[in-house]
């Protein structure tokens, strides 16, 4: 692996100062499951690696039914699904965090890292978008909050400016009659990069039959994880039915801009967006309390 | 070599201090600096599990951990799980079930299985397969490995209840 | 690999009746097991020598290019770099073909594969290597080697390479056309043919004819241990090499040829090997490490491949295109079969098309048959053996067509195989008469199995489709080559068994058991060990499913020699004629005396001449292996994904020495075959660059992708082995792809004609053939 300086930062301020000073030449290390591979393969070259795991704020994982879920940038996946309260409240998020890599990857990998790595196929990002999550970012000039769907701007590139660091991800509190789901398609049953990923979230009215809100986000079908507002919007006010769900899936398919690569063809991906959107919506609806007739 | 950092860690119950460069992975440190070559390199990319170790109670790929990150940590490798003059039940069951052929993936499997049983003493077959999915074996088709882990879980449960 | 069978091998034949064994058939713990579960076992990359340098290999970024120049000066100037080698450091070898291991090697091509000379022929082809004081320095030095290339157009598949006007890889290559040398430059190295009977008449007799063309991708053995070699070129010019190899003596011979040195100058120390499956029968790094050691002033040098290098730089097995036309009478009798198959060899000739030509129809009686096979060079890594080389692709094609014939005729697929199955006395498609085999027994056992007798499970989710498929496989094995062992009786009554056959999956315990059975001892009384090339006679590679068979015969013979010596020692002790001394179950006795093996060993001690035996044999026997597999699959027609629900593998193993390791071979082979069937394939871009050279993107099955694999052992003893052993390692990889394809057809009505049957390929087949479902 290339030589670099390892800096275990102990405060956010320290990390920000180094990021401001070094710019592209510094990179934050949390779980390292992407960064270490990139450094080893020479896909990323840096002078300094800033380990943030000793910074208390970014290790916080807290859930409050009133305020929602806050996930520090350095919290590994296993801590998220290891929390029964979080698992019960956000099964759609758990879908994603429990299938990133294998168990040993989940012991290290973080949602913060998944987000900042900005892979179009990142598993957690469509789930976070569907859940209307936002990122809390801190820089030399203070904090700002970025909706997750705006966070990634290109493969490997994010909204983070020089000197900015991701502190945490926030997911709003669970509203009644709502549910989320994440599905990805991979050729094996584990350990693969998504050919297509779909995050879905829905809310129903009190009768449990009419959709009041919905969000759909897609992975691996565009240069960045793709929020498809029109797909969710089309569901609002409609009675739950197979046809309604199929329409949303068709809209999602139309929004996808897949390419052909070694993991799948454009045609296959486009088709899978339809299949997975439909399936993810059905799971989300069920979790929201919809009981099929 | 320039820029070596002194790192203190507890490896297999022993306090260890070593020097390493920032770019050296924990896997390199174990194998080349500490000469604990029981931890194997299969892909150096987090995809095969041959290098798995337990870091502060959490299963990790040692190729995806920097050596310097081991500062202050407790690490368990394949060399550290057997009692003196004996074998861990997993090791014993791997032998009894012929759950290894070439043996290169075996240390990683045993470490992963230990992490599983530490975390979940009575796993189902599906849970074993899920937990071990990050460990690749090309010789066995996994059948005997899964049986060995399930059998070890049973034996350990009996030992605990005694 | 196929050896012409062996009518002349009768001399080695022994009669094997129903026999009772004490040790054979039991499941003792392997002798090398404790070291392997505790991390103490030393594999190739675990070698640590004082002053050791790290070597790395520079590889071609191009699939096909002329090397215009190589400038290593900047690399050599980098601090820490001690040596650089290129093909200029290797002698130019004559284009001479020799048998090495199971196959033929052209020494010039072997050398050019180790370090490219005038051209690079595939992405990943080795061009130069460096040795430095750290891995980092070695990697950095690679970036400083300046290679000027003139890129050339490339061909990745056999079909591309055979097209008129295709770019030519090897200007000197001429087709060996049924024995005659062609005249024009070509990528077709050879065209062979097996034929018999009258095709036209056979097809005229057919009630049903099926004709399909199958294509299969390149797959890799996927052993978890990357190739590695550590070498010291001593100041006395003796070379020591620690390596991971399936055959230390073969490795020594290959290094000797490439370096143009006598074998006596080279000692190869075989370390524990982390899988091979045929892929570690050829050398890549050993001469490079040796030359780096020499050029760096005799320092030890270790070169270990990265996982990408394993995929890009070592031999996978062939991609292929196979056309099968087969006709059957309405009673299910196959009346004619015509096969044309082209296998891609990679950069240099030598695909396993010959083995494929025998696999594809040998399990069946064929009166009217013609098989044409082409060996074709392509801009991909030179293939190496992979478990029943060529067999999986071949059986995928033939077993699919036989299944389709059975479907069309409304005959149970196992009944179809029973009707046509070969047995003793039939003539193989490739010529020789078939001796005692257990093919029909595997078919019957499969038919009677709980799996086949049970109904298909219901789909796990409504809408998914389930199906069942069967397929059979033939593999000729290599019951030949040379095996040498030495046996030493220790004065405590234990016995050292010194072998040279690489133990790749438990053969030490299988050898120890055969010796224990012969001597009437326990397996634990035997101490088996695999030693270096200076310390035991020549041994051919652990490949071709030969080791438990051939080395087992050597072990048995050595045991018989020990028995004779122990009888003589007892005769001396008791002052009787040795002819009057008997030996049975580890007890030596005469009319008035008896003594146990251990006690006699203690009495004999060390001072009175050790009891030892050394044996070297070349059995040239027979030992064809056959298998029949059953699989249940679930197909998600919306995604194309296929899940294996249940798997049963029935195999004639002759005699199972250690049943657990026999089952392990069957399960492992089936698992590799399932991986090949479902997802494994090299993916190249337009420029011939390998895109998926990692264990992330080259998808071998995980524990979550497979069910338990039920191994059903059938024992039809092989008459050419003292205990009836047949090689078991290879044939289990032959049927899986065909079985899975047939199960998919059963589930969906769609016939897959491409490997892998990945979700993408299954979806495409469903889309294109959806309206022709049967």
Image (cartoon, coloured by chain):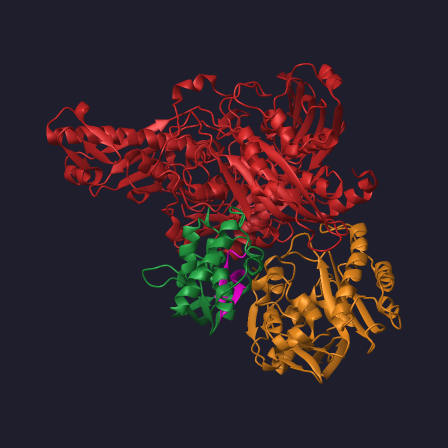
Q: Is residue C133 visible?
A: no
Q: Position of residue B64 (x, y in %)?
A: 56, 63
Numbered circles on residues, count: 0
Q: Position of residue B57 (x, y in %)?
A: 49, 70
Chain B colour is: green
What range of the chain is rendered magenta? Answer: B49-63
Q: Is residue C96 visible?
A: yes
Residue B13 is inside the magenta segment:
no
* Res. A58 image quadrant: bottom right
Q: Quadrant of the C terminus of chain C?
A: top right
Chain C colour is: red
C33 relative to C180 in the view: left or right = left
> Front-most of B9 and C296?
B9
Instruction: Specify the chain shown as orange.
Output: A
Q: Position of residue C300 (x, y in %)?
A: 41, 48
> Front-most of B105 and C297?
B105
> Front-most of C235 and A211?
A211
């Amino acid at each position: 692996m290339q030589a670099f300086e390892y800096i275990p930062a102990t405060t956010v301020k320290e990390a920000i100062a180094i990021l401001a000073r070094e710019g592209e030449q510094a990179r934050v290390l949390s779980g390292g499951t992407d960064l270490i591979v990139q450094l080893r393969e020479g896909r990323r070259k840096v002078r300094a690696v800033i380990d943030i795991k000793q910074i208390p704020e970014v290790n916080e994982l807290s859930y409050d039914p009133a305020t929602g879920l806050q996930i520090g940038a350095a919290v590994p996946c296993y801590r998220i699904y290891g929390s029964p309260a979080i698992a019960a409240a956000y099964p759609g998020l758990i879908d994603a965090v429990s299938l990133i890599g294998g168990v040993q990857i989940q012991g290290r990998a973080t949602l913060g890292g998944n987000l900042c790595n900005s892979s179009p196929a990142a598993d957690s990002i469509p789930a976070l978008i569907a859940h209307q999550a936002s990122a809390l970012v801190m820089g030399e000039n203070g904090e700002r909050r970025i909706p997750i769907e705006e966070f990634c701007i290109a493969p490997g590139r994010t909204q983070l400016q020089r000197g900015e660091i991701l502190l945490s991800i926030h997911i709003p509190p669970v509203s009644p009659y709502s549910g989320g789901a994440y599905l990805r398609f991979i050729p094996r049953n584990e350990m693969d990069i998504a050919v297509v990923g779909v995050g879905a979230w829905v809310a129903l009215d009190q009768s449990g039959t009419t959709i009041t809100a919905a969000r759909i986000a897609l992975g691996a079908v565009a240069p960045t994880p793709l929020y498809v507002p029109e797909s969710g919007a089309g569901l609002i006010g409609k009675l739950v039915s197979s046809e309604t769900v199929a329409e949303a899936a068709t809209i999602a398919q139309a929004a996808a801009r897949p390419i052909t690569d070694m993991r799948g063809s454009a045609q296959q991906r486009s088709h899978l967006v339809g299949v997975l959107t439909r399936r993810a919506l059905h799971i989300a609806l069920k979790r929201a309390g919809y009981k099929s007739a | 070599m320039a820029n070596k950092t002194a790192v203190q860690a507890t490896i297999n119950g022993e306090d260890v201090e070593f020097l390493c460069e920032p770019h050296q992975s924990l896997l390199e440190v174990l194998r080349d600096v500490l000469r604990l070559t029981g931890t194997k390199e299969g892909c150096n990319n987090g995809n095969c599990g041959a290098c798995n170790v337990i870091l502060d109670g959490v299963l990790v790929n040692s190729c995806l951990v920097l050596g310097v990150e081991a500062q202050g940590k407790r690490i368990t490798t394949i060399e550290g799980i057997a009692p003196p003059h004996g074998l861990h039940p997993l090791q014993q069951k791997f032998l009894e079930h012929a759950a290894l052929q070439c043996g290169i993936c075996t240390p990683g499997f045993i470490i992963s299985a230990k992490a599983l049983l530490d975390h979940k003493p009575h796993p189902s077959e599906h849970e074993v397969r899920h937990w071990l999915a990050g460990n690749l074996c090309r010789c066995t088709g996994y059948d005997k490995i899964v049986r060995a882990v399930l059998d070890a879980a049973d034996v350990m449960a009996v030992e605990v209840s005694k | 690999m196929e050896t012409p069978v062996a009518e002349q091998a009768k001399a080695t034949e022994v009669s094997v009746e129903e026999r009772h064994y004490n040790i054979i058939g039991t499941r003792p713990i392997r002798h090398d097991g404790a070291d392997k579960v505790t991390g103490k076992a030393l594999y190739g990359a675990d070698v640590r020598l004082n002053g050791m340098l790290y070597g790395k290999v520079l590889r071609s970024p191009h699939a096909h290019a002329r090397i215009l120049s190589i400038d290593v000066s900047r690399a050599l100037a980098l601090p820490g770099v001690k040596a650089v080698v290129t093909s200029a450091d290797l002698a130019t070898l004559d284009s001479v073909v020799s048998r090495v291991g199971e196959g033929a090697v052209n020494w010039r091509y072997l050398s050019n594969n180790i370090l490219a000379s005038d051209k690079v022929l595939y992405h990943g082809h080795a061009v130069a290597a460096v040795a430095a004081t750290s891995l980092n320095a070695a990697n950095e030095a690679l970036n400083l080697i300046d290679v000027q290339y003139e890129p050339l157009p490339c061909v990745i598949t056999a079909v591309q390479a055979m097209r008129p006007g295709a770019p030519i890889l090897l200007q000197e290559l001429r087709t060996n056309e049924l024995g005659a040398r062609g005249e024009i430059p070509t990528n077709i190295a050879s065209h062979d043919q097996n034929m018999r009977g009258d095709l036209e008449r056979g097809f005229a007799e057919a009630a049903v004819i099926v004709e399909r063309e199958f294509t299969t991708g390149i797959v890799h053995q996927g052993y978890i241990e990357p190739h590695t070699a550590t070498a010291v070129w001593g100041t006395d010019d003796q070379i020591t090499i620690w390596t991971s190899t399936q055959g230390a003596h073969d490795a020594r011979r290959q290094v000797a040829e490439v370096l143009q040195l006598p074998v006596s100058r080279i000692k190869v120390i075989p370390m524990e090997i982390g899988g091979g499956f045929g892929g570690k029968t050829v050398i890549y790094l050993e001469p490079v490490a040796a030359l780096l050691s020499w050029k760096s002033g005799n320092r030890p040098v270790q070169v270990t491949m990265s996982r990408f290098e394993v995929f890009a730089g070592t031999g996978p097995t062939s991609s292929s295109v196979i056309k099968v036309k087969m006709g059957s009478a309405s009673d299910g009798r196959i009346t004619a079969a015509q096969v044309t198959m082209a296998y891609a060899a990679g950069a240099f000739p030598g695909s396993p098309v010959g083995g494929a030509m025998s696999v594809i129809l040998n399990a069946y009686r064929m009166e009217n048959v013609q098989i044409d096979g082409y060996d074709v060079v392509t801009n991909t890594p030179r293939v190496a053996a992979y478990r029943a080389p060529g067999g999986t692709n071949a059986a995928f094609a033939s077993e699919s067509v036989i299944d389709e014939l059975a479907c069309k005729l409304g005959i149970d697929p196992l009944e179809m195989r029973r009707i046509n199955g070969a047995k003793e006395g039939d003539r193989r498609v490739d010529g020789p008469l078939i001796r005692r085999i257990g093919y029909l027994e595997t078919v019957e056992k499969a038919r009677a199995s709980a799996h086949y007798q049970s109904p298909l499970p219901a789909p796990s989710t409504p809408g998914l489709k389930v199906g069942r498929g069967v397929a059979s496989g033939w593999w000729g094995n290599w019951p030949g080559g040379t095996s040498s062992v030495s046996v030493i009786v220790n004065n405590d009554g234990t016995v050292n068994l010194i072998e040279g056959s690489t133990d790749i999956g438990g053969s030490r315990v299988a050898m120890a058991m055969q010796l224990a059975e012969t001597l009437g001892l326990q397996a634990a009384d035997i101490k088996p060990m695999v030693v270096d090339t200076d310390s035991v006679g020549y041994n051919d590679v652990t490949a071709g499913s030969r080791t438990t068979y051939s080395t087992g015969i050597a072990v048995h013979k050595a045991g018989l020699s020990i028995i004779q010596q122990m009888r003589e020692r007892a005769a001396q002790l008791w002052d009787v004629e040795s002819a009057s001394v008997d030996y049975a179950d580890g007890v030596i006795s005469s009319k008035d005396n008896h003594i146990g093996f251990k006690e006699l060993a203690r009495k004999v001690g060390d001072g009175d001449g050790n009891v030892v035996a050394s044996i070297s044999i070349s059995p040239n026997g027979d030992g064809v292996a056959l298998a029949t597999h059953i699989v249940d699959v679930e197909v998600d027609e919306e995604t194309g994904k296929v899940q294996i629900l249940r798997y049963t593998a029935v195999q004639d193993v002759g005699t199972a020495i250690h049943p657990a390791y026999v089952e392990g071979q069957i399960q492992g082979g089936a698992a590799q075959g399932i991986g090949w069937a479902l997802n494994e394939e090299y993916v190249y871009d337009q420029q011939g660059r390998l895109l998926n050279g990692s264990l992330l993107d080259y998808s071998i099955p995980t524990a979550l992708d497979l069910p338990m694999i039920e191994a059903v052992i059938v024992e039809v003893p092989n008459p050419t082995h003292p205990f009836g052993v047949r090689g078991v390692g290879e044939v289990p990889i032959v049927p899986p792809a065909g079985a899975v394809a047939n199960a998919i057809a059963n589930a969906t009505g769609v016939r897959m004609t491409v490997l892998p049957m990945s979700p993408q390929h299954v979806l495409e087949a469903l889309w294109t053939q959806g309206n022709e479902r049967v």
